[in-house]
Amino acid sequence: MLKEFKEFAMHGNVMDLAVGVIIGAAFGKIVSSLVEDIIMPPIGALLGHVDFSAKFINLSGKSFETLVEAKKINAATLNYGVFLTTVLNFLIVAFAVFLVVHQVNRWTKKPEAPAAPTTKDCPQCAMTIPIAAKRCGHCTSQLA
């Protein structure tokens, strides 16, 4: 059983999947940094120096200046700023995956169109004859 597991784990597809998961996790961190550190600050500045990661709606009835304060005491909050950042992360990752898949599809060979037929069946005797035949060689019927 151990030998079978080793064969399974070392099989090419499993190793490819593992590499893909590791690269995907690293790519996710890069995209998160891109959104949180590069994209959201200018958007916040354009909207009046808004820090989206700190935007929340307090549901607890108590007053909190920041989301960090609310989280310290586990207050109920709707963290819509964090949600917007996460949605933007997802859209960027989805677009990047689309671009990669689109490029890979362009690299793969498309199946060739099937070759034009060179024979046909005689309508009288159903035997195979050349497509250019004017008369069946089997039953000698005239063909259109």
Image: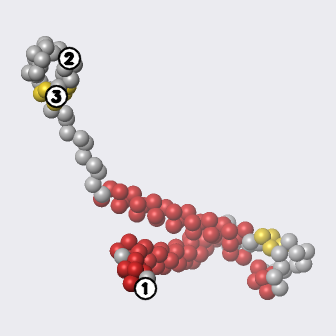
- What is the three-letter code of the residue carrying label 1? Leu
What separation in Å lies between label 3 and label 2 (alpha carbons)?
A: 11 Å
- What is the three-letter code of the residue carrying label 3? Thr
Res 128 label: 3
Q: Nearer the viewer, residue 34 or 24?
A: 24
Q: Quadrant of residue 102?
A: bottom left
* Mark 1 Cα shell of 10 Å, populated few (<14), some (14-19), many (≥20): few
- What is the three-letter code of the residue carrying label 2? Gln
Residue 7 coordinates in the image, percent (x, y): 37, 80
Q: Which residue is mark 1?
A: 2
Q: Nearer the viewer, residue 115 or 34?
A: 115
Counting residues from the N terminus, which is met first, the one under dot 3 or under dot 1?
1
Residue 131 coordinates in the image, percent (x, y): 14, 26
Residue at the spot 83% in from the left edge and 79% down from the top edge: 75
Residue 15 coordinates in the image, percent (x, y): 39, 77
Q: Quadrant of residue 56?
A: bottom right
Residue 118 coordinates in the image, percent (x, y): 15, 32
Is residue 144 toward the left or the right of residue 106 in the image? left
Residue at the spot 17% in from the left edge and 14% down from the top edge: 144
Mark 3: which secondary structure? strand
